[in-house]
Image (cartoon, rainbow, N blue to C red):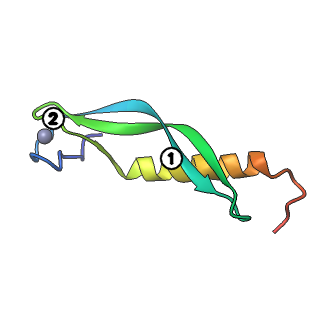
């Protein structure tokens, strides 16, 4: 799947790589917590530019939801 092009130089010589990342998020009570996850990033073989694709946003959302459900046991019904 290489329908991805480098946003820096436009080359299609891009390689996916997985990195560890973490970010801070807040739950519905406004308490912040840290979410750790693995993200897919892309690296351009031509100019070495490195960026996150839309799948990284999806991965963040999934990790955030997982962390939320781990923090709040089943009794936190909506
Ligand atoms: Zn490039």
| Residue plotted at (45% across, 53% down) | 57
In this figure, what is the number of numbered marks?
Answer: 2
Left or right, residue 45 beside residue 71: left
Residue 36 sits in quarter: top right
Residue 15 sits in quarter: top left
Q: Position of residue 27 (x, y in %)?
A: 68, 59
Pointers 2 and 1 in contact (CB under 8 A)?
no
Of residue 21 and residue 52, the one placed in the foreground of this image is 21
Q: Which residue is mark 1?
A: 59
- As drawn, the residue found furthest toward the right would be 75
State yes or no: Cβ of the residue under disc 2 lies below 8 Å from any atom of ligand 1: yes
Q: Is residue 70 above or below residue 43?
A: below
The alpha-carbon separation of the residues under discs 2 and 1 comes to 23 Å
Q: Quadrant of the N terminus?
A: top left
Looking at the rendered structure, the secondary structure element under dot 2 is loop
Q: Position of residue 72 (x, y in %)?
A: 80, 52
Q: Position of residue 55 (x, y in %)?
A: 42, 48
Q: Quadrant of the C terminus?
A: bottom right
- As drawn, the residue found furthest toward the bottom would be 78
Judge depth for marks 2 and 1 and give the one in front.
1
Left or right, residue 58 beside residue 32: left
Q: Quadrant of ligand 1?
A: top left
Q: Is residue 21 above or below residue 64?
A: above
Looking at the rendered structure, the secondary structure element under dot 1 is helix
Q: Which residue is mark 2?
A: 13
């Amino acid at each position: 799947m290489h329908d991805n092009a480098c946003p820096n130089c436009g080359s299609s010589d891009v390689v996916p790589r997985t990195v560890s990342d973490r970010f801070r998020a807040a739950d519905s009570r406004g308490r912040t917590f840290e979410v750790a996850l693995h993200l897919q990033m892309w690296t351009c073989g031509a100019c070495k530019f490195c960026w996150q694709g839309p799948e990284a946003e999806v991965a963040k959302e999934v990790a955030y939801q997982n962390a939320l459900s781990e923090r709040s046991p089943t009794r936190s019904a909506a």
